Image (cartoon, rainbow, N blue to C red):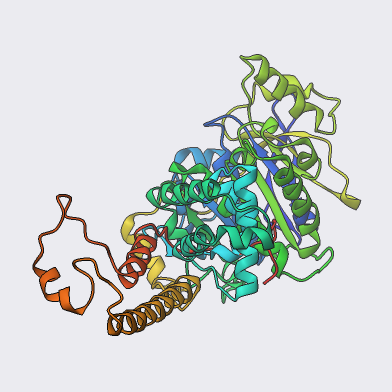
Amino acid sequence: MPQQQDGQIFVGASRKPDDSINKDEYLTLKYGNRHGLVTGATGTGKTVTLQVLAEGFSKAGVPVFCADIKGDLSGIAAKGEAKDFLVKRAEEIGLSPYTFEQFPVIFWDIYGEKGHRVRTTIAEMGPLLLARLMDASEAQEGVLNIAFKIADQGGLALLDLKDLQALLNYMSENASELSGQFGLISQSSVGSIQRALLVLEQQGAEHFFGEPALAITDIMRVSQQGYGQISVLAADKLMMNPRLYATFLLWLLSELFEELPEVGDPDKPKLVFFFDEAHLLFNDAPKVLTERVEQVVRLIRSKGVGVYFVTQNPLDVPETVLAQLGNRVQHALRAYSPREQKAVKTAADTFRPNPDFSTADVITTLGTGEALVSMLEAKGAPSIVERTLIRPPSGRVGPVTDAERQAIMSASPVAGVYDTDVDRESAYEILTARARKAAEQDAAKQAEEQQSGNAGSRWTLPGFGNDDQAASKNQPRGRSGYQRETIVEAAMKSVARTVATQVGRALVRGILGSLKR
């Protein structure tokens, strides 16, 4: 009669070569912060496995953060139903009684449509992650680093995209002076960054930058019943911009690393973080970024955070990161191409062999909801890999309705906290005020000089001087209709251009390449 036990999460029951039940498979909570990997081809059951693990951690009082790529995972917030295939699986593995329940869920959404708004600031994002988001060149990344340095020294808070845009305009207009102090600031690089920011705005990234920024404590809540809150990020729309999705989750991981205290190896994790579609994190990533990801994954364990990568192919994860993922669930892989055959071999080689079967052969024959499982056991050693039937979840398999989602959001512990934008004084307002003041001073000085010059009949050409002002007003304009603008008009047009090219709300700087606040 397998059930979740103290200190363990029931994952499923392993099978012998003759398909009879062998033994129950558990994930030990003590090793839950040693990270994990869930892989398998499309349609093999990865999402259900993710839900089973999330439910298990929640029951144990461990908060969970996960992304809902297809919308199916939202059903974890609703009570499950006794569908035939679920009841059959429960009977196959001897799960009796098979009970259904709903779990405490907080829905999040960068766009604020299917969950509470989740934002960060430009400052917390930092230059390295921002460069990754914009696919910036090395020269452009250098300009971004200089921008953050200037902001730090000048007390210019970078909260949203219009703050960064205003600062870039300032850098472009004062490139010669600033280059002597901070290094070369190429106007072409500044222009390229500004164009990239405009592209981000068109892709909806402005929703991601601004305040109020997400407080890490709000994804680490425990319900009154002692269940860990499950934070579900609506990612179906976000996946239309996969670079933003990967950068956001990497920023969140970095913030956890920066803000949480050292706890060593607790009896259970403080938080478990599921990174679905993990290959997006490493696609075309520069070496320095991959190295930082490896470092964060390695060190965040001591903060009590478990990171579980969910992806189709184990080759999607670099070997240096793969080596740190102790808890493994491998669903079926296909082996039609040379790369797929290599993936099967790689997956098989990462498991502790089972003398009863060939791991590489079994990987290609697993059924839906069946997986090869190896979890860390005594002294943190991986268990012998077992062919396992994954247990059915207790929450609903499938999405919640729009009405159910709205009801859950209305009763959420963070309802009203993040749903309204806050736009306090920051770099944009400060630089705009400085530009306006300078324009007013220049205008006053020009007026004073003009008045002084007029007294001495300084100008003798038609249209200049007091004697000719009245006549000048009646003179027709040139054929182009052009009339020279005043300094005040020029300054205000510059401010208007800054506003017109703003790109949204900004992020609080993470640790990856960020500057200390």
Q: With 110 as the anchor, is 2 left or right in this view?
A: right
Q: Quadrant of residue 472?
A: bottom left
Q: With 379 as the anchor, is 20 left or right in this view?
A: left
Position above or below: 228 against 425: above
Q: Position of residue 487 (x, y in %)?
A: 34, 70
* 486 or 306: nearer the viewer: 486
Q: Residue at x 59, y 47 (%)?
A: 140
Q: Position of residue 191 (x, y in %)?
A: 48, 49
Q: Quadrant of residue 302?
A: bottom right
Q: Residue at x 57, y 66 (%)?
A: 229
Q: Position of residue 59 (x, y in %)?
A: 63, 62
Q: Residue furthest right?
A: 379
Q: With 237 as the anchor, is 159 left or right in this view?
A: right
Q: Is residue 414 visible?
A: yes
* 229 or 275: nearer the viewer: 275
Q: Position of residue 516 (x, y in %)?
A: 70, 69
* 257 or 445: nearer the viewer: 445
Count of labels in the image = 0
Q: With 205 as the anchor, is 450 left or right in this view?
A: left
Q: Quadrant of the C terminus?
A: bottom right
* 466 or 254: nearer the viewer: 466
Q: Residue at x 39, y 62 (%)?
A: 498
Q: Is residue 56 visible?
A: no
